Image (cartoon, rainbow, N blue to C red):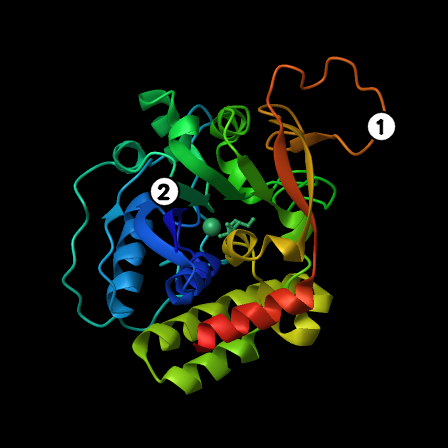
Amino acid sequence: ARKVIYDTDPGVDDAMALYYALAHPGIDVVGITTTFGNVTVEQAATNGLYLTEIAGRKIPVTLGVKTPWLKAPGTPPDFIHGGDGLGNLPSRVATTSVLDPRPSAQFIVDMARAHPGEITLVAVGPLGNLATALKLEPKLPQLLQEVIIMGGTVAEPGNVSPVAEANIWNDPHSADFVFTAGWKLTMVGLDVTHQLIVPLALFKKVADHHKHVATDTLHHAVSFYADFYSGIYPHVAKIHGCFGHDVLAFVALTNPELFEIQTGRIRVATEGPANGQTMMRRKDIFYPQPGWGDEVPDTHACLQLKADEALQLIESTLMS
Ligand code: BDR
Ligand code: CA
């Protein structure tokens, strides 16, 4: 199985992605590094600990960056993921696990040095922990096997502005630093995550099947998230579901054949009306764009998804 550090801001779809990863035989989650984003970093860490413990797993969980690198901090909205990040759970069972004392960035660096070339980083929140880890260890791109990011968008409209996706918009300077650092990097953005609508009924089926606190928690959380998305997008309301965003970063790891992936250079706008926009100079489009992006290495972006197959894979993995 691939060793993965999961950098996350749970978050409903983050929780969905975590349970996909824990259930998948091809993935070995060796650490969970948390960041601010959908909730404060303290709440994200609390949720990371809670979700792993109720799933019966012992995995180190760390506290990461509290705020963006240079952008002014904001307050996480409570109407997307709930004030607690998990759809306002009515109660929580008692748990005992505690955080690993290291900051998220230090944990990433320590793990990468201890297992050179073996760790994949799946990052599904704002990218401050990766940026901080890069500052601590500039050789990180050579020490990690691969980085997969849920964030950004190439051609699909943004979700926090006409051009920006939330994770990138939340910390655009860290994102630009990460996109230009020279690792094997794949972006799983709204281009593909907006192609995957996961019905709430799937989570009911999974909960009914396992009859377990972990899958009940996920079902509750997704019902809140599905209400939010159904209120915004009429085509999502028809299915009464939600976008699967973060889970697709893991699907890109386990089943890259379900994606059309293009190569090119990605930069992030860090100011003005396009703040947080990810811009890609695609290698497959032969149109001269002199000088643009010449200074940065190639990365990859997922642009199309076999959505039906991805949905079946998510269902069968969560049912297993
Ligand atoms: C991303 O933003 C967060 O709200 C989700 O968890 C996901 O990572 C989607 O834009
Ligand atoms: Ca997320």
The picture places residue 10, in percent across and down from the top left corner, at 39, 54
Residue drawn at 44 percent across, 49 percent down: 38
Residue under circle 2? Answer: 35
Query: Residue 277, located in which quarter of the rendered image?
Result: top right
- Image mark count: 2
Q: Which residue is mark 1?
A: 286
Q: CA distance from mark 1 to mark 2?
A: 38 Å
Q: Is residue 82 visible?
A: no
**Is label 1 in a helix, a strand or a loop?**
loop
Under circle 2, the secondary element is: loop
Vertical position of residue 319 compared to residue 256: above or below: below
User: Residue at point 84% right, 20% down?
Assistant: 288
Q: Position of residue 229 (x, y in %)?
A: 60, 63
Residue 98: x and y in percent read: 16, 53
Q: Residues within 10 Å of mark 2 (few under 14, many from 20)?
A: many
Mark 1 or mark 2, which has the lower sequence index? Answer: 2
Q: Residue drawn at (31%, 77%), measured in percent from left and top? A: 213
Quarter occupied by the C terminus: bottom left
- Within-10-Å neighbours for mark 1: few <14, some 14–19, many 20+: few
Q: Is residue 182 left or right of residue 268?
A: left
Q: Is residue 298 at least partly visible in the picture? A: yes
Say left or right for 29 vs 281: left
Which quadrant of the view contains residue 165? top right
Left or right: residue 44 compared with residue 165: left
User: Residue 198 location, x and y as percent?
Assistant: 59, 69
Closer to the camera in the image, 315 or 82? 315
Q: Amino acid at mark 1?
A: Phe
State which mark lies toward you, 1 or 2: 1
Image side of residue 309 versus residue 9, left or right? right
User: Which residue type carries mark 2?
Assistant: Thr
